[in-house]
Amino acid sequence: MRIFLSTILVTVFSFGISLADIDFDRFFLEKTMRVDYFHTGIQGKEVISLDQVREEPIWAGSRVNLIDTLNLGKYFFKVFDAKTNQMIYSRGFSSIYGEWETTDEAAKGIWRTFSESVRFPYPKGTVQLAIAVRDEGGYYKNIFSTVIDPNSHYVNREPPTSDMSVISVQKMGEPAKKVDLLILGDGYTRDEMGQFRKDVERFTKALFDTSPFKERKKDFNVWAIEVASQDSGPDQPHLGIFRNTALGCSYNTFDSPRYMLTYENKAFREIAANAPYDQLFFIVNSNQYGGGGIFNLYSTTFTRAEKEVQSWWPDYVFVHEFGHSFGGLGDEYYSSSVAYTDFYSSKVEPWESNVTALHDPDNVKWKDLIEEGTPLPTPWDKAEYDELDAERRALETDDPDYGRKLTEITVRREELFQKQKYFGKVGAFEGSGYVSEGMYRPSLDCRMFTKSLAEFCPVCRQAIERMIDFYTE
C-alpha cells in the first residue's frame, strides 16, 4: 500500500481558523515529524515536491496552542487528522524560496530549487499535510498536499548523530511551556569551541538586555550545540573565499554581500534534532558585517566587528534578525540596497505587524497604540534624514577618521529625531519595507529601522510579546 498519496487540489479543506481546543494526547506523541520537500519555480510559478518524512526524537513546542491564529507568514501549513477531517495543527512561516522569487534572477525565468521543511508533533494516525501560499490579494491558496501514515516503513527513523555536545545555556522550565531558542555555530573549528561558548553567552546577554525580552526572560530556554567545522569562517563568494563548514552559511545570498544564509536545510535540521527548539539561530565565526532572518526558519549573524567603533554591531544584528525570525517583523529601513524587486506590493497590506501600506488610515493595524489627534500619515523631516543617511552610507570603513565621522552622524540623527513633533509617538511615518514612498512604519526609530541599539518601538514590542504568549500559554 502506498503511504504518500499526493493530491493536486485540496478542495475539501478550508483554510479558515478553527478555535476548537485540540487534545494533544489524543492525536500526537511526544516527538516530532519533519517533512522535507523541494520548492522549485520562477517568479509567478512554484511547485512543491516531497523529499522525505523524518522522525525526530524531541517535541519542544506547545501542547496547547496547536492552531496558529496569528495570520503571519507568506506560507501556511495545516495538518488534518484523516479519520475525522479535523485540523489538528497549523503554522505560518516564510522561506528562502519566498524571498528568492522576488529577485531579478527569478523574474528572468531562471528556475531554482530549495530544500525546505515543516515540523509538527508526531501524529498517532494518518494525516493530511497541506501547504498554502498567499496570493496577490494576500489570501492563502493551496499549492501542495500529501497523505502520511506515521507508521509506514517509508518514514525515516534513523537516530540523529549524537556525538555533539548539547549545552543548556538557560533553563527556565519545561520546553512545552517556554520558547526554546537553539544556537548553532558555523565556521568554528574544534579548537575554536571555547570562543563559540563565549559568543553564545555574549549574544544571550544581548538579547535579554533588550526589551521586551528583558522583561520576559523567564519565558525562554536557550540551548546550544557544539558543532565543529573543518574550516574556520564562512563562505564569502564575492571575495572568492569558500570554506567547508558544518552549516554551510555564506555571504552574498541573492548577490547581496551582507546577506548571509545557508541553503543546506537538511544538514542543519539533522544537527538541530539533538536538542529542543522552537527557534534556530546560527552565529557565524566572522568579522564581516552580515546576517539574515526569515520568519519561523532561522536567523544568522556575524560575531565580531573589525573596528572598536563597530563593536556593538553584532549585538544589533543578533536582536534585529531575531525580530524577523521570531517576531515576524519586517524591515523598516528603506535606503539600504537589497536584492529584492517589489518585495511589497503597493496594492496589498503587508502581513508583517510593523509595516503598512496605509490603504485605510482609519483602521491601521496598530491603531490601538495611536494617540488621538496624531495625523496619518505622520509628518517628519524625511528629506533631512535622507541626507544624513546618504552621508553614513558614503563613509569608507578604511578611512582613518571613520569612527569620528560615524559617531558625528549618529549624534545628528538622534538630534533630528528628538526635535520631531511626533518623536516617541506611534503613527505612520513614510519610508519602510525597502521603499521610500508608499510604505509606512509605526515610529520614527526602532531596532527594525536604524542600525543602532534603539529599543523596539511599541508596535514591535507588542508583536514580540504576542508571539511569546503564543508559545508559552
Image (tube, rainbow, N blue to C red):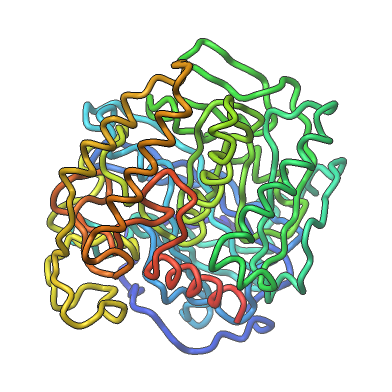
Residue 388 in picture, x, y percent from top left: 26, 37
| Residue 326 rendering spot, x and y as whole percentages | 51, 59
Q: Is residue 141 visible?
A: no
Q: Quadrant of residue 282?
A: top right
Vertical placement of residue 371 versus 134, above or below: below
Q: Is residue 443 rendered to the left or right of residue 125? A: left
At 78% from the left edge and 26% from the top edge, which residue is drawn? 189
Residue at x 61% of width, y 51% of height: 280
Give the camera-side residue of 242 and 40.
Answer: 242
Where residue 173 sits in the image (x, y, percent)? 77, 74
At 49% from the left and 77% from the top, the residue drawn is 67
The quarter in which the C terminus is drawn is bottom right
- 305 w.r.t. 32: above or below: above
- Return the residue nearer the eye: 221 or 49: 221
User: In this view of the protein, can residue 262 be seen by the observer?
Assistant: yes
Left or right for 3, reference 352: right
Q: Residue furthest bottom?
A: 20
Q: Quadrant of residue 428?
A: bottom left
